[in-house]
Amino acid sequence: DAGVIQSPRHEVTEMGQEVTLRCKPISGHDYLFWYRQTMMRGLELLIYFNNNVPIDDSGMPEDRFSAKMPNASFSTLKIQPSEPRDSAVYFCASSSGTGADSNQPQHFGDGTRLSIL
Amino acid sequence: GDSVTQMEGPVTLSEEAFLTINCTYTATGYPSLFWYVQYPGEGLQLLLKATKADDKGSNKGFEATYRKETTSFHLEKGSVQVSDSAVYFCALRAGHAGKSTFGDGTTLTVKP
């Protein structure tokens, strides 16, 4: 089975540019998560969706960050405008849901390494 | 709210040494508990899990037992290898929540 697929794997861009990160979750999973990982702050949950609906975006650092999930097989995380302090590895993860599946783990993609110059 | 506290790292061991990484948690209800491993340049991947008290999760020689009385889920391995060098994350998922709560991660380096 295909795992969580993220693109691009690496992104280098200049400050002020718009950055769009993409994620395809595992088919059948109804939760999708966006994380940011840095040496200084560790792994941070930015936002998560259930059945394509945003449930908790309290981890989104600023209004420059936005996330969408237009359908069950695709999500984007956008940064506009980007700043050097946004440089990090961004992970997408998915999992299945509630009830009998509530003990299921998250499945992570390989991440997007973002560098803002 | 829910929280996970992990033994601070980094941890450096010689090959074939015994490994323990401590993990304690605070949660309402009866969470499921997980250990994830992250190798350099990769995402986190599930190492093992336990879903109820006294369950033991095991995989690749690693083990952890769900101890409700001490709210702990310590990771152990009897003989580590250089290839076990990675960052290890303890996590919980409470039944009412879709998200998981992660510890800060413990970096393990195994030297030949």
Image (spheres, coloured by chain):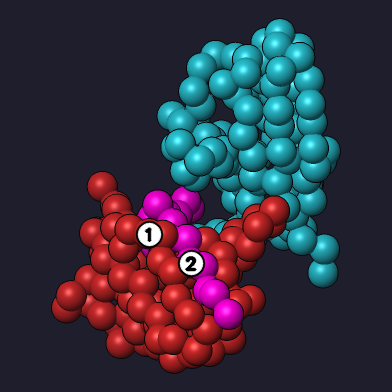
In the image, residue A101 lies at what x, y percent?
Answer: 53, 68
A61 displayed left or right of B5: right
Number of other residues with Cα within 10 Å of mark 2, as a class: few under 14, some 14 to 19, many 20 or more: many
The chain that hosts pointer 2 is B
Mark 2 and mark 1 in contact? Answer it, CB < 8 Å.
yes
Q: Quadrant of the N terminus of chain A?
A: bottom right
What colour has chain B?
red
In the image, residue A72 lies at what x, y percent?
Answer: 74, 45
- Magenta span has B2? no
Tag of residue B36: none
Number of other residues with Cα within 10 Å of mark 1, as a class: few under 14, some 14 to 19, many 20 or more: some
Instruction: Write the residue at 73% across / 40% down.
Output: A112
| Residue bounds of the magenta highlight | B92-112
Instruction: Write the residue at 51% across / 68% down.
Output: B109
Front one among A94 and B70: B70
Q: Earlier in the sequence, mark 2 or mark 1?
A: 1
Name above or below for residue A2 compared with residue A41: below
Tag of residue B108: 2
Front one among A14 and A57: A14
Name above or below for residue A83 compared with residue B65: above
* Quarter holding residue A116: top right
**Marks 2/1: CA–CA distance:** 7 Å
Q: Secondary structure at mark 1?
A: loop
Tell me the cyan chain: A
A2 displayed left or right of B56: right
Tag of residue B9: 1
